[in-house]
Image: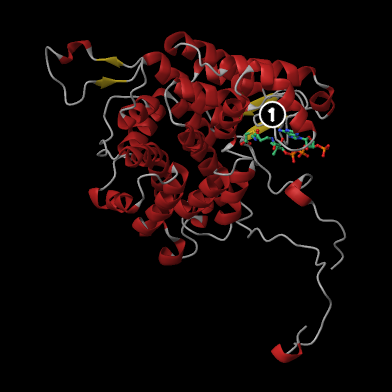
Amino acid sequence: RGLRVADRGFLNTAVIESAITYIDGERGILRYRGYPIEQLAEKSTFLECAYLLIYGALPARSQLSHFEREVLLHGIMHADATKFFGSFRYDAHPMAMLTSAFAYLGSYYGEANPSLQGQTLFTKCAKGDPEALQNMDKQIYRLIGKAITLAAMAYRVRQGREFVVPPTGMSYAESFLYQLDHLSPTDSFSASSSASPSPSPYKPHPVLARALDILFILHADHEMNASSTTVLQTGSSLPDPYSAVAAGCASLYGPLHGGANEAVIRMLVSIGSPNNVPTFLAAVKRREKVLSGFGHRVYKTSDPRSFIIRKIADEVFAVTGPDPLLDTAMALHDAALKDDYFVSRKLAPNVDFWSGLIYRAMGFPMDFFPVLFVVPRIVGWVAHWRQMMLSPEGVKIWRPRQIYVGPSERSYVPFDERE
Ligand code: CMC
């Protein structure tokens, strides 16, 4: 009652006050807890950024070691909890597997379930209850640690290969590559493997591992994007955090969000060569096609992450050799940026325009690209979830309104009298 205009797509609705990530879409600025993304990409690591996003400050050395140890330790899955992966078809989309896997973890860790443990389980954290805070931290370590384990399991199901136990003594990105046992053409093998055989000779290439770590930093958070909003919307009715993260995975899966990097490669393959770019852009302007990897709800100038990614792309291509689609991507990029249709609508390349090309050069299959986005974004989701749970005002269920435009009251019509 009283509502006259619906804010379709939440173009002008702020749903929360947040101290986590700042974006200025007009000036192309992105900061995590006040630190510019460019500085973090150059100087930080993914797990340090994770700590920063979740707890609000750069960690002291000892805090970071503790956090890294806990996260990597919690990557290990109980053997029982891996069995359900056997029920997936060999060709299931990895995002479908990952979404189900997080929901499954919700069934596995009853201690994180407010329906079982009492509604105030995590809301007690706002009052500083040490046991509740410890429980919350544990779920956070688990969610981040298990993200790479579950993602690697989804990858290996596709290949019909055994799962790899998370290693020790590796960074987060290295551990992920190790568990994938992902063999891109340039991967190096331990020089000492012939002299002293080790359990696995696989060693992630340092340039590729660092590139992946930076890509994880860039994807870790982006304030109220569709999936973070979904996690909070779901979390606001107080389910366990695994269920909220499963909902976030489902949201991120779509081609307008985390599926865009996959869509970019499909688009470039379909364009085929730089010569076909004008025909493709004409179809976009007739609204028959979408220029994937361009446009953003918030950035009305360039996405600052796209410049950093462009630089990483060069570093990765120096190791792997350039992607044959690069010429088409460059031609498309340059033509769109000169075309009045895109200029007048302030459509510029977003983070996904280049990321898919990097993942492809590293040898990842296309349908695994959204997984490479979701793994780091889980950090942003738990940062937002924790912030909401710790809010001094308490958690308010997210229950928006609608404007009803259906029929007014009418009487039930029996079958025989229906037209
Ligand atoms: N190709 C062609 N036209 C576009 C595109 C595009 N990629 N993006 C927006 N437009 C047009 C749109 O048709 C509209 O035109 P008009 O005013 O004549 O009707 C105008 O530009 C404004 O766009 P909008 O649809 O109001 O923008 P939005 O904020 O609702 O949507 C978006 C944002 C990201 C969903 C959209 O730009 C899009 O679909 N881009 C392609 C998919 C993509 O790259 N997604 C990744 C986003 S970044 C990472 C992430 O968040 O996951």
Nearest the viewer among 178 and 183 is: 183
SS category of the residue bearing label 1: loop
Label 1 sits on residue: 294
Q: Is residue 275 left or right of residue 237?
A: right
Write the residue at 51% across / 34% down. Answer: 373
Q: Is residue 83 left or right of residue 346?
A: left
The answer to whether any part of residue 168 appears in the image is: yes
Q: Is mark 1 within 8 Å of ligand 1?
A: yes
Q: Residue 376: horizontal and vertical position, in percent?
A: 49, 34
Q: Residue 38: horizontal and vertical position, in percent?
A: 60, 18
Q: Is 298 located above or below residue 407 in the figure?
A: above
Rendered-image quadrant of the C terminus = bottom right
Structural crowding at the residue carrying mark 1, measured as other residues with C-alpha within 10 Å and reported as few (<14), some (14–19) or many (≥20): many
Q: Is 405 located above or below residue 17 in the figure?
A: below
Q: Residue 211: horizontal and vertical position, in percent?
A: 46, 19
Q: Residue 49: horizontal and vertical position, in percent?
A: 50, 28
Of the four image quadrants, the one with ligand 1 is top right
Total number of numbered labels?
Answer: 1
Nearest the viewer among 326 and 76 is: 326
